[in-house]
Image (spheres, helix red, strand yellow):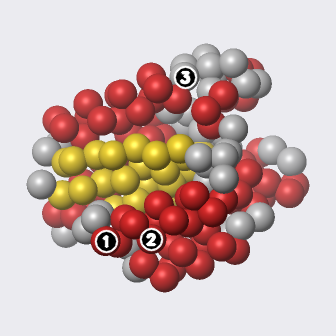
Amino acid sequence: MSKILLINGPNLNLLGTRETDIYGSRTLADIEAEFIEEAAALQLQAETFQSNNEGAIVDRIHQAAKDAVEVIIINPGAYTHTSVAIRDALAGVGISTIEVHLSNIYQREEFRHHSFVAPVAKGQIAGFGPLGYLMALWAARRMIAGS
């Protein structure tokens, strides 16, 4: 069974209570549970990981290569706009990556318009709320199938 890793970055553990006008009222646990359920329906093995620590995210990306993960789906949170380390880790492991954002980062503050992850990702999904995670999962399944 193909392995998918979902990584969520800083402050996403606050979903459901943090700026609900931007991020909605669903918790990260709710989103992850739906993600795992949909992955199973697609016959994919999904694992989730969240950290507020940049180094822990880099370490988990490195571990993904050892774990034979086929696709990483990542919402780097604020690290999207600041982390060369996460970008380099993704490039270094060579695992197909899909970047996801709950909000449309291009409709927000100017500093959020730049992503260090986008140039090393197969694609980016932004602005669809929690549905974006499922959209990334569907895309990952197609990527694995080679279509």
Q: Amino acid at mark 3?
A: Thr
Question: Which residue is disc 3 drawn over?
Answer: 27
Q: Is residue 28 above or below residue 97?
A: above
Q: Amino acid at mark 2?
A: His
What label sits on residue 51 in the rendered view? Answer: none
Residue at the (30%, 35%) spot, across then down = 36
63 lies left or right of 83: left
Q: Nearer the viewer, mark 2 or mark 3?
A: 2
Question: Which residue is disc 1 drawn over?
Answer: 66
Circles 1 and 3, Cβ within 8 Å, touching? The answer is no
Circles 1 and 2, Cβ within 8 Å, touching? The answer is yes
The answer to which image quadrant residue 11 occupies is: top right
Q: Is residue 112 above or below residue 58?
A: above
Residue 126 visible in image: no
Badge 1: residue crowd in 10 Å (few <14, some 14–19, many ≥20) = few
122 lies left or right of 85: left
Q: Amino acid at mark 1?
A: Lys
Residue at the (79%, 54%) spot, across then down = 112
- Give the mark nearest the N terminus, 2 or 3: 3
Question: Which residue is disc 2 drawn over?
Answer: 62
- Give the mark nearest the N terminus, 1 or 3: 3
Residue 71 position in % (x across, y down): 34, 62
124 lies left or right of 11: left
Position of the C terminus, as image quadrant, is bottom left
Residue 60 position in % (x across, y down): 47, 61
Badge 3: residue crowd in 10 Å (few <14, some 14–19, many ≥20) = some
Circles 2 and 3, Cβ within 8 Å, touching? The answer is no
Q: CA distance from mark 1 to mark 2?
A: 7 Å
Residue at the (61%, 54%) spot, across then down = 76
